[in-house]
Image: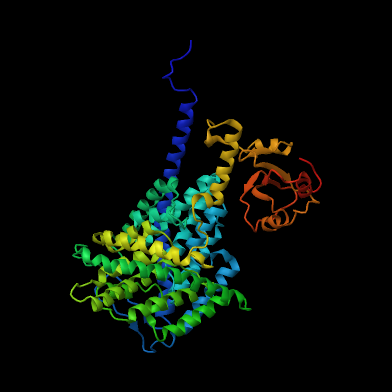
Amino acid sequence: MTPPESDPPRTAVPAALKFQWKEYRLLFYSALIGVAGGLAAQIFVWLLNTAERFLLVGIAGYSAPEPGIPNPEAIVGPHGLWLVPLVTTLGGLISGILVYSFAPEAEGHGTDAAVESFHYKGGKIRPIVPLIKALSSAVTIGSGGAAGREGPTAQISVGVGSILADLLRLPDEERRILVLAGMAAGLAAIFKSPLGMAIFAVEILYSGMAFETEALIYTIVASVIAYAVNGLFVGWTPIFLFPGNIHFTRPVELAGYAALGVLAGVVGAIEPPIFYRTRDFFKALRVPNHIKPAIGGLLVGVLALWVPEILSTGYGWIQKAMTGNYIGGFLIWLALLKIIAMSLTISSGGSGGVFGPNVYIGGMLGAWVAYEADRWIPGVGFMPPAFAVVGMAAVFAGTARVPVATMVMVAEMTGGYGLIVPSMLATALAFVVQRTIAARSRYPRLYEAQVELRTDSPTHYEQMLRAAFAVLEAGPLVNLHNVTFPHLVSLLRHGTPIPIHNGQGFLTSLAVGEKSPLAGRTVAEMSELYPEMVAAAVIRAKQVLYPRGATRLQAGDQLLVVAGRDIKIEAVQEAEGGGSL
């Protein structure tokens, strides 16, 4: 008897249960990573405080001001600042030896390494990297290096996610989710910003307006757990002391916030070229890599003799700017000098994050805009604390291209939720202005591993390519969750090109042989040799590779190409090395 049409197919229930089990399993793993991220943040802060106590405070006698009090002050020892260059150089040397002896991928800012791992490495990170990152970053920042705590903490907790995936033998798809959960957990703990960092982890992957939405529920769980674990140790107060009576109530102030957003976009466009040209300079130096962070540390130390405000994270100086105790034209110079100090510290090979310095840069820029706006438009009463908070969000929104996450996280870090409206305006303007100015720049953004949209990610490119093959084979009703390596490649190998664009071209397959002129060449060189063919994918050992210009073809590769209908068959056979389709 034929069942009624309303009865569900028998195969639907097991598939749904299997999918739900995967969700619950990943939620549980995300919670575990949240616990690990909260504890990792505490361990890193302890390492950082220990390094600072022995190096910057113990040797140089300098103690930077701390946030959370109305008017923090620095403490300078009996030797003044003269021992600071010695300490920053020593810290750079120790960090360089640690990184380049054991884990070279731990250099620089850790968040970019996590983004690169997601897009290009299946979320895999060597287990030794979190340990070396923690030690080297603690020494770098503890000796006065102008770097932030978020990058190291992110890479540490990301490493925890990768290690957990290794132990459980999870597929790359689930490993990447746990890597993002680890990023959110570490950052939420270190910055006391659970919602902002949950969004940050899924937004930082892309330089355009795109999100890794499938991972958001897991980053939320991980960040909430990490925030709670961290709170058990250090409490729940925000990092910065912010006047609770400051709210957006006067629309006329939007003119000042709009100006701040535009200037933040300009700063965001200036910063990446300075940062990466400094990196290029140090790469060109003909000295061992182990020594380069010491050179960067020495230059930072010398600069600090005149401007000690650029040392370490500098959150205490932001607090002074927020509470109105640090005003004037010198603020804009502090913002620009912090860019230089951050570049010397991290681009020389030192280890640390870039979010902390950008919070500093944005806070100083915002306070300066309020100061200048009061001079040019007297009587309005622009408030430095409010502009400092909005500046923090706007600068990093433009520089890192994460407008949504920064708007939320800065509000959580300060408790300044009354400034959400001006933050929305400033971050949107900063994002658009930065992209416009940096469009033709060699270094358009601070996170090099970002891609523009999901369609540009090698991870999603492979998934979409497999899905497209499956649809061509099985029709539009194919279950894309169960797609295996496409049989379409086998059909192409046996000589049936597939017409596309109404017969204007065709999709075909080339087997790159030992004698093929393509063997050993890059995809870019192939385009020059055969301009009438465009590489669509490279299949190597049953893996689909994204054909970038630098991708080097190997004998044994199966190359999927799109060609015009007028291409001569001899050209295709030559590319194969004498074979036939």
Q: Is residue 136 above or below residue 208?
A: below
Q: Tell me where residue 509 appears, x and y as whole percent.
A: 70, 43
Q: Tell me where residue 187 appears, x and y as whole percent.
A: 40, 59
Q: Is residue 537 above or below residue 371?
A: above
Q: Is residue 553 left or right of residue 353?
A: right
- Toward the top, the furthest residue is 1
Q: Tell me where residue 372 appears, x and y as whole percent.
A: 28, 77
Q: Nearer the viewer, residue 137 or 135?
A: 137
Residue 346 visible to the viewer:
no
Q: Nearer the viewer, residue 353 or 529?
A: 529
Quarter location, residue 335: bottom left
Q: Is residue 414 left or right of residue 201?
A: left
Quarter location, residue 408: bottom left
Q: Is residue 514 left or right of residue 467?
A: right
Q: Is residue 182 above or below residue 448?
A: above
Q: Tell me where residue 278 appears, x and y as whole percent.
A: 53, 75
At horizontal 19% and vertical 62% (from top left) the residue drawn is: 249
Q: Is residue 289 above or below residue 226?
A: below
Residue 109 visible to the viewer:
yes
